[in-house]
Image: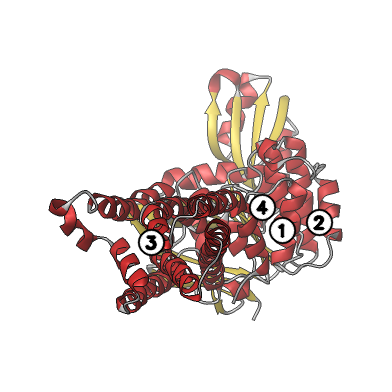
Amino acid sequence: MISKTLMKQTIKSNLSLWLVLTGLQAVMVALVAVSGTNLQQTALAYYNMLPGLISAIYVIVTSNKMIASQVDKGTLAYVLSTPVKRSKVAFTQATFFLGSLFIMFSISAGAHILSHYIGVGSISGGEVKAILLLNVGLFVLNAALSGICFLTSCVFNLSKYVTAVGGGIVGSFMILSIMAMFGESFHWMRNLTLVTLFDIDSVLSGSSDYIWKFIVLAAVATVTYIIGSIAFTKRDLPL
Amino acid sequence: MDEIIKIQNLTKDFGQGRGIFDVNLSIKKGEVFGLVGINGSGKSTIMRHLMGFLRPDRGNTSIMGKDCWKSAAKLKKYVGYIPGEISFPDVHSGLDFLKLQADYMSLNSMAYANELVERLNLDPTAKLKRMSKGMKQKTAIVNAFMSDSDILLLDEATTGLDPLMQKSFIEIVQNEKKKGKTIFMSSHMFDEMESTCDRVAFLKNGEIIHVVDMKTILGKETMKEYKIEFNKQADYSEFLTRSFDITRRQDEYSQVTIHISDSNVDRLFGVLSTMDVRFISHKPYTLEACFKEIYNNTEVV
């Protein structure tokens, strides 16, 4: 199902951005947590605002490179002139995209746990669980956002449309979630963005609300990745 | 059944009169088949259907009896391709690119690739980004031929090549033909087609207007054109009274162009033997002349 050659090639051409943003994100959470603040405050300062923005940049830039820019530039012609199926191309790229996000948040989770331990001096099982859950939440959120962008990357022939539509949707979700923090009168905006389903309060308070919300995000990711891949295998390619 | 590529009623309408309309072609195993047409006449669109990149609106294309759209990936084991537009993936050098492609194709030996590199005088270690158009084209040519595929689809393979390299390319194509490969190529270089193709199809506004057998072209034709100039006006006038098929008269030069079949050429020399001829020259019927003639005389709705 996966083309090893394509996977190697995809990793090579996306590694630098991934490294920079993964590193940045891990350093940021570490800097907050190592100061010895408690989990609640770290969550407020870090999980509420920043990682969404960093990973959103990664999602928007990378989604375009997954399929659309290769169609736009015509480089995909060389891959598809070999016995590699389109479905294999889509599956390989999707695996890379989701895998790279998974590793990105695993590293952040590790950095948070380690720096919390260093900063506070101890860490409880409950705190480890909460940190892991927060990063699982960020992962499913970004999986959903990347799914939307991946879908646009599969459907459009031109990179600029992917950036406009996929980037536009993810960007608006981010802006809406930030706007909603600016007081009661903007609070309704929370209902318009997927970011709201990343329910930090529920994770920290120990309620089980987050479970269905995470499942919805995972479902959005699954559906968009599958529709995108199918659309890619069925459409005309101007190569 | 030696038919290897089949295109039936292929139609792809891009709107505004662009696209290809009801194209029918049948290419035999071992044949070199050319496709000529001006820019935008639909050459690449036909190629893209054969590659399974485009899905026909109507009709179908098949290679070795398999549908080009449904069995696209499977067929690539037997097909080498040069795309109309060359744009390489994000790798360092030409050699890296060729190795990458060999990897996709599970190709073990680069021996033939090296031979081609040598023959095209290509420096494969050059950086892809700094390559000239011709060098990129050469790299694409090596890529298409190196897996020794039975079928080759070449979409304007010589664009950007200098005349010397065009010759090398023609030699490579002729060589592949000797090996029994089936080659389907589009081009607007008539001389390139003349020296390689068995048959050539003319494409106008997305429709095939004519398929010419190269046996009837380039001196191999039985009807030939000769241009004759006389030293004396009297001979000229005398010649005009003999019943030859005269296609052009230039009274001021005492010059005449006639159309005559090989079987009648004795009669021509019989007549000329008593006359004062300044020169006689054979005007070969080229593919280009044939194309122009048919192209201008065919109306496509």
Q: Distance from label 4 to label 2 (Cα)?
A: 41 Å
Q: Is residue A152 above or below residue B157?
A: below
Q: Which residue is mark 4?
A: B222
Given this view, does label 1 or label 4 mark the residue nearer the observer? 1
Q: Which residue is mark 3?
A: A40
Q: Chain of mark 3?
A: A
Q: Which residue is mark 1?
A: B100
Q: Return the x and y of residue B249 as percentages of the image width and height.
A: 54, 29
Q: Distance from label 4 to label 3 (Cα)?
A: 94 Å
- Left or right for B77, reference B15: right
Q: Secondary structure at mark 1?
A: helix
Q: Which residue is mark 2?
A: B113
Q: Chain of mark 1?
A: B
* Amino acid marked by disc 1: Leu
Do dots 4 and 2 share one subunit?
yes
Farthest residue to the left: give it.
A185
- Left or right for B63, reference B78: left
Q: Distance from label 3 to label 2 (Cα)?
A: 62 Å
Q: Return the x and y of residue B4 as percentages of the image width and height.
A: 62, 73
Q: Chain of mark 2?
A: B
